[in-house]
């Protein structure tokens, strides 16, 4: 940091297990990726190439090398996994992971109907090859999953081999964990936290108000995902109580 301030919460250091920031690349160019890691690399723990954007992104290898050289792991969005699964191409998907030397993979079922036991089988198989992130929640705003079911699904996926589970919100932040207005389903979040350790969850929170909610609830070292590249540094200031929304939250606290 460029200067000293008291009453700034202590952030975990990379590589970290909590305080994780997952940034979403929705089709950055190689040059944009270079600029992004130059400015934000210190604060980004992992990059998700959103949904199936990798299928159509030019110069994919060159861009992945930018992240690789910066020491930032990356993975393809879960929708790409679903696109292979719905076409009965799981083995082809595994070959794609090897081809691009993917250190992580996301297993999700937000756009397809997938038997949960089968989903857990995919998690177990892929965990032998890569580190698995599994996503819980639907991209269908009309599909409301009760809290007890979120807990059950998350726990089973962790037991199957997922390193962390992701709470679905899409890049818009208006499904899954959130109402169509973007408002947090706070009762759902707090009930999940009674059973699933907070460090095992990455909460997709693309909107500032959502980020503020999770930081105030769980502290500066909450895991947050689907962060737009231009929002990574603004998020870090929220985590440190250096933006109006969390300015008073950490004053007088130690650590």
Image: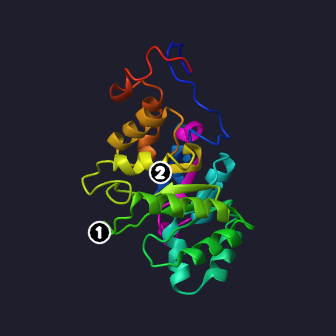
Q: Is residue 112 magenta?
A: no
Q: Earlier in the sequence, mark 2 or mark 1?
A: 1
Locate residue 57, reporting x and y percent.
Answer: 50, 67
Element carrying mark 1: loop
Q: In the rendering, which numbered label is found on residue 202?
A: none
Between 4 and 30, the one lying in front of the other is: 4
Rendered image quadrant of residue 111: bottom left
Between 136 and 153, the one lying in front of the other is: 153
Q: Is residue 47 magenta?
A: yes
Q: In the rendered view, would you say 218 is above or below 1?
A: below
Mark 2 or mark 1, which is nearer to you?
2
Locate residue 63, reporting x and y percent.
Answer: 58, 58
Q: Is residue 78 left or right of residue 168?
A: right
| Residue that mark 2 sits on | 192
Q: Is residue 73 left or right of residue 231?
A: right
Mark 2 surroundings: few (<14), some (14-19) or many (≥20) residues within 10 A: many
Element carrying mark 2: helix
* Residue 86 visible in the displayed image: yes
Mark 1 surroundings: few (<14), some (14-19) or many (≥20) residues within 10 A: few
Query: Looking at the image, which residue is at 47% across and 26% down?
Result: 240
Q: How is the image coloured?
A: rainbow
Query: Looking at the image, which residue is at 66% across and 38% down?
Result: 14
**Range shown magenta:** 40-59
Between 233 and 207, the one lying in front of the other is: 207
* Residue 99 visible in the displayed image: no
| Residue that mark 1 sits on | 142
Query: Looking at the image, which residue is at 67% across and 67% down?
Result: 100
Locate residue 177, reporting x and y percent.
Answer: 38, 54
Locate residue 137, reporting x and y percent.
Answer: 43, 63
C-alpha gap between disc 2 and disc 1? 20 Å
Q: In the rendered view, would you say 90 is above or below 131?
A: below
């Amino acid at each position: 940091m460029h200067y000293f301030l008291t009453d700034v919460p202590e952030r975990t250091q990379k590589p970290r297990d909590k305080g994780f920031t997952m940034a979403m690349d929705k089709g950055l160019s190689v040059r944009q990726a270079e600029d992004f890691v130059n400015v934000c690399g210190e604060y980004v723990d992992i990059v998700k190439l959103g949904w199936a954007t990798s299928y159509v992104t030019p110069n994919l290898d060159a861009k992945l090398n930018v992240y690789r050289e910066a020491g930032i792991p990356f993975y393809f969005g879960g929708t790409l996994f679903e696109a292979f699964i719905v076409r009965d191409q799981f083995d082809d998907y595994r070959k794609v992971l090897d081809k691009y030397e993917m250190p992580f993979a996301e297993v999700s079922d937000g756009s397809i109907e997938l038997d949960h036991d089968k989903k857990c089988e995919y998690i177990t198989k892929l965990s032998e090859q890569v580190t698995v992130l599994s996503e819980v929640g639907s991209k269908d705003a009309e599909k409301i999953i009760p809290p007890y079911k979120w807990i059950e699904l998350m726990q089973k996926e962790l037991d199957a081999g997922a390193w962390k589970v992701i709470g679905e919100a899409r890049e818009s932040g208006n499904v899954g964990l959130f109402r169509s207005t973007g408002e947090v389903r706070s009762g759902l979040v707090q009930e999940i936290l009674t059973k699933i350790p907070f460090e095992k969850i990455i909460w997709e929170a693309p909107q500032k108000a959502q980020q503020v909610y999770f930081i105030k609830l769980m502290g500066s070292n909450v895991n947050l995902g689907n962060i737009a590249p231009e929002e990574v540094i603004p998020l870090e200031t929220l985590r440190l109580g250096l933006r109006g929304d969390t300015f008073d939250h950490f004053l007088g606290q130690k650590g």
